[in-house]
Image (tube, coloured by chain):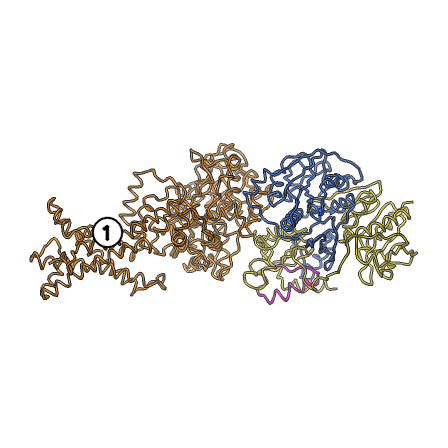
Chain colours: A yellow, B orange, C blue
Amino acid sequence: MRAVLVIGETDGDEIKDISQQVSAVAAGMGDVVGLVIGKSISDAGMKLATAKIILADDDKLEYYDPIKFSSVISQVVEQNGITKILMGATTMGKDLGPRVAAELGWGYLGDCLEAGNEGFVRPTFAGKVLAKSNPEGPVVVSIRNNAYPAGESWSGSVENFSGNIPDSTTNTISIEKGESGTVELTEASIVVSGGRGLESSENYDEHIRPLASTLNAAAGASRAIVDAGWVPHSHQVGQTGKTVTPDLYLAIGISGAIQHLGGMSGSKFIVAINKDSDAPIFKVADYGIVANLFDIIPILKSKLSK
Amino acid sequence: MNPFHDYYGIPWYAILGLWSLIALGSHIYQVGFIVKLIRLGKDDDRFNSWKQRTKEFLTDWLGQRKVVQDKLAGYAHALIFWGFLMLVSDVIDLGTGGLFAKFLEKIYLVNIWNLVVDIGYTMAGIGIIISLYRRLIVRPEKLKGASVEGVLILFAILGIVITAFIVEAGYMIGDKAHYNNWEPVGVLFAKQMENINIETLGTIVDASYWIHMILIGLFLIEIPQTKHSHLIGTIPNVMFQDHEPMGTMLPMQTDDNNIAVKTDDLDFDNLTLGVNKFTDFTWRQLSDGWACTACARCQDVCPAYNSGKTLNPMQIIMDIKNYGKEHGTSLLSGNEPEENIVERFTPDAIWACTTCYACVEACPVHIEHVPKLTDTRRHLVMEASEFPEELQSMFNNLERNSNPWGLGAHTRAHWAEGLDIKIGEPAEYLFYVGCAGSFDDRNKKVSIATAKLLKEAGVDFSILGEMEACNGDPARRAGNEFLFQMMAEMNVDTMNSLGTLKVITACPHCFHTIGKEYEKYGGKYEVYHHSQILNDLRQKEKIIIKDFEDKVTFHDPCYLGRIGGETEAPRGALGNDLIEMERHGTNSFCCGGGGAQIWMEEDADKRVNEIRAREASKTGADTVAVGCPFCMTMMSDGLKSIGDGKPVKDISEILLENLEVKT
Amino acid sequence: MNIAVLIKMVPDTESRLEIVDGKVKEDGFKYMVNPYDEFAVEQAVQFKEKVGGKVTLVCLFSDNPGIDTDLRKMMAIGADEAVVLRQDGYSGDKPSTNSKILAEAVKNLNADIVIGGVQGIDYYQGATGPMVAHHLNIPHISGVTKLELNGEKITARRQIEGGLQIIESELPVLITAQKDMTKVRFPALKDIMMSKRKPFENHNVSASGENDVETIECSLPPARDGGLIIDGESPEEKVDKLLEKLRMEAKVL
C-alpha cells in the first residue's frame, strides 16, 4: 500500500495553511494519512485536509521535541504502512524531517518548491540552481510555504494515537513571543527598506513602517537616512550596517550605491521603487517600478492588507 | 666699564662658574636622558646619501626652507634663528670676561665678529618683536588658547638681546671711552646711556650682565623640557629625513636587498607586527617628539582634526615626548610601563587618519606623523585584533573575492563588454582598472570613458580582466600588512607573467601602491595616472578636445597631487582654464576617503567631505572635476549633503564629453 | 568539557555557477567554511574559556587540499585540534551518508556538546545536524540563537515562527547555531600563523549507507532578466503587476 503521511501543524484554533497546502499535494500521491501532534490540538487538528487523521494529543507532547515527535511518527509509519512523509518546511518541519529520516533510514528532501508524483525540486546554492529528484524508495519531504494552493478541510475518519511516548532529557521551559510589529532585520524573510527618496523622517514612519508591518517584515534603511537621524543605526543595511539575505527586499527611494548593495545583494528577490530610472538599484533589482514612491506605496499597502 | 669684578669679595667667575655648572649640568643630563630614550628605538639606517643629506641640511635647517612657507611666522622665526646663529658665540666672550674677543683680535677677526654679533642680536630682536606682534595683536585662530609660556619665552629672549646691548654699550662708555663702529647698535645704546651717572651706570651694566647670564642658564635648563627641545631635535630630524618616496609604507621584514621577505619565510616568533610599545618605534620616529616646535601647522591642515575627530597630529607627536618624559626612568631601566603608546594615542585617534600626508608636508622640521599611526594600526589589526568591525568584512572580501565589496570576482571585466578591449594579452600598456572602476556603477563610467579615449588616440593597451585583483591598498593603510603582502605578491606574479612594463590607472591609490610600493615585492613598472596619459595625448593632439564653457574646479587627490607629486597633468588635460579652490595642488584638502576611511563609519558632527564640498561650492564652478574614485564618491556625497547639486565628473568623462571625434 | 564542532566546507556564494550536462560544474569552486559553522566554533571556544576543556573541529570533505587556510583560521579562534575526514566522492548533498561518517568520528571524542551551524549555504537542508544527533543517540536543538551553559545543563533559545522556544537540556546534546548566535572574533593574524602548530589530522573515510536521494538533474531557474521594469498606465496597474509577479513568479508572497 502506498500510503503518504502528512504531518500537520496547528496555530491556536486553526490548522496552519501550509499544512493544508501539503495535504493537497499528498492527495495526488496515494492514500493519505494525516498526523497532528501536540497538546489540546484535537479541535484544530481535525481540520487537516486529509482522508484519515491521527491525533497524538498528550500533555507530554505540549512542546515540539524531536525525539518524542520522531518516535510517534515512526510508530504511525509502521502501523500504517507509510512510504512517504510530507510536511511543511516550517521551523519544526525542517528540524523534525531529518531526524525522522535518520530514524527510519529514509532519504530526505527539504524545502521543496515542487512536489508530486513526477518528483521533487529543491532550490540550492541560494536559489541559483534547481535540483530535481525522483526517489523510488521511501522518503521524507518538506515543502515550502505557498508553493501550492491549500486543500479544503473535510470530514474523514479520526483516530487517536495510542502508542508510546518516550521521555526526553530536554524540556521546553517557555515560549517567548516576539515583539509585535518588529521583526529582526537579519532574520526577516522580507525587508522593506527606505532611502533618501522619502525626503523626511515623517515619511519613513508613514510609509515604510506600516508597509513592513503589513508584510510582517523588518524595516531597513540606507546609510544616508541613518546619518540624517531619521532612523537608528540598527536599521542600517549596507557595508557598514547589517547584511541581510531575505527572500524579498523592497528598496524604496534608495539609489543603490555600492556600499548599500554590499548589504543586500544576497537577497533572493529585489524590488526597487525609485523615480530615477538611472538609479543603480535597478541594475540589481528583479522587478522595478520607475515612479514616484509616494504614488506607489499607499496603493501597495492597501492591496497587501486585503 | 664691565661687570668682571668681585661681588662682595667673590670673584665674578666663581659665581658664573657655579651657575654654569648648574645650568650646563642640568642641560647635559637632560639631553643625555633624551638621547638614551631615543636610542631605545629600533634601528633605521639613514646613515647614507651623505651628499644629499648635507645639501638638505643646508637648505632645510640652515635655509629654513619649509619654515618660511608661513610667511609671517616663518620669516619672524628665520630672523630669530639666523640671528641666534650669529650671536651665539657672544656668550663665550661674556663668559670669559672678554678673553675671546682678545683672541679674535690676534687673528684679525674681531671686527667682523663684532659686526656679525650686533646684526645677529638685532635680527633676533626684530624677529621677536614681529612674533610678539603676531601673538598679542594679530592673534591668529590657531593660537587661541595658547598658554602664556610662549609670550614669556619671547620676552625672555628679548631680554637677552637688550641686556647684551646694554653690556656692550657699557664697555664702550666706561673702559674704552670710544665708540666702536663695528658695533653699531651698541653705539646707539651707548649714546642713550652716556649721560647716566657713573655709579648708576655701573649697577645697570652689572645687573644686565647677570640677567643675561641667568636667562641663558635658565634657557639651558628649560630647552630640553619644552618645545624648545627643537633646538636640539631638529638637527638629527632634518639631517636624517625620509628619503623613501612620500607615503610609502614599509614591508614587515626586508632582506639585504631591501626586498620584502616572502610571507612563507617570515619568522613569526621573532617578528613584531607594528607598534605597541614605545620601544617598538625606530629611533627616528622617536626623535620626532623632540623636534616638534608646537607650531600646529600639521593640526591646521589635518582633515580629521578639522572635522572634529579626536585625532590631532601635533598631539600624537607631543604624546611621544610626554610619554617619554613620564615613563622615561622605567623605560631606561628595562621595565615596561603599564600604559603603552597605543593607549596614549587612543585607538579613536589612530583610526581617524586618512593618510593624506598633509601633516608631513606642512611640517617644517620633517616630522613623520602618518607612519606612527599606520604602524600602530598594524599592531591593532595583526596582533591585538582590535579594530573597527566594518574592516573585518572588508578584509574577508579582499581575501575571498579580491575586491573590498565581496562582489563576484568573475564579474570584474563586465564593464568592458562591447568595447572591444584586449583582455589578458600583452600590450604596450596595462590599463589597471582597479576595484572601484570595475565594480562600482558610478566609477565604471570612468573606466569606460578612459578606455574610449585611449582607443580614440590609438593607444595599445589591455586589461587583466578576471586576473586583476585589488592592489591591496585598503588592507595596507588599515594595517593588515599580512593581507596586503599576499595580494601584492599575487598581482606582481600576474603582471610579470604578462611581461608588464607600463601601467595606466585611473585611481591614485593604485597609482601609488603599484608605482611606488610594489617594487619591494618584485614588481617594478612605469605607472601613469590616466590624467598624465590624457594630458600627454592632448598636448600631442592625439585626442582633440573642444573648448567647453563649463567652469571647472579640480580637486587634487591626495595620492596624486601631494603624495604622488603630480599636479600639472590633470590641469593640462582639462585645458588649464580652471577655477582653483583656495587649497589646491599639494595643499589640497583631503576628501576624507583615504586611509581605509571609506570603509569605516564616520560619526563626528563635521564630515571631512562636507568641509571640502563647501570649499568646492564656494568657487562658483559649474562642475567639480576629480581624478580618483574615492574622491568621486566623497565629493558627490558631500555636495549632496550640503544641498549643492553640482555634478562631479572624472577628468576622463569631461574629456570624452568634449571630444572632437576624428572623421 | 569536550566539545566537538561540525564544520562543513561550502562553495563561495560569489563563485561562478555553471551547469554542464545537468550537473553543477564544481572544479572552479573556491571553498570556505560555512558561515553558520563559524558561530558554532566561536561558541564552543567561549565555553572552553569559561569551564576549561577541549574543542575539536570535525570536518568531512573531499581530498581537495585548498581548505587548510580556512580551517587554520577556525583553529586560530581557539580550537585545539582538527580532524579532517577525506572522502573520495564526497558530496555536500548527502546528509544521510555524511551524518553517519561524522557521527563515527565524533563517537571517539566523548563530546559533552556537539555543535554546528543550522544549515549549509550550499543546500540549505539543515539535515546533517539532526541526523548526526540521531546516530549518536543524543537529543538535538536546532536553529539556536542564544546558548548558555549552566553547570551540567544548557539553556537554548530556539528560533520559531513569531518568537523563541526556551529549552533546557542535559548533556550530551547536539546544537545547531542560527545566525548571530554570538559574535565571532577575528583571530589575530599571528594566531593564524601559529595555528600551523596545532594538531591537524587527515583521515580517509569511505561512504556507507545509501539512503540519500539522488539528484537526477540540475537546472538554472528561469532567467530573471535582472531589472524588469514594470510597465503600466497608472500606479495602480503597476502595483497590480508587481504583486502578481511576486506571488506567481517569485513566490515570495
Left or right of B648? Residue A31 is right
Q: Is residue B580 visible?
A: no
Picture layout, residue B357 above or below residue C210? below
Residue B304: x %, y % from top left: 45, 56
The one of B169 and B278 positioned closer to us in this rendering: B278
Amino acid type assigned to the residue bearing label 1 in the image? Trp
Q: Quadrant of residue B541?
A: top left
- Residue A76 lies left or right of residue C214; in this view the side is right
Q: Position of residue A181 (x, y in %)?
A: 69, 64
Q: Which residues are magenta?
A: A200-220
Quarter that holds the C terminus of chain C: bottom right
- Chain letter of the residue carrying label 1: B
Circle 1 Cα neighbour tier, 10 Å, few/some/many (<14 / 14–19 / ≥20): many
Question: Regarding mark 1 in the picture, which secondary structure is present there?
Answer: helix
Of residue B663 and residue A126, the one placed in the foreground of this image is A126
Q: To which residue does mark 1 refer?
A: B82
> In the picture provided, is B179 more to the left or to the right than B507?
left
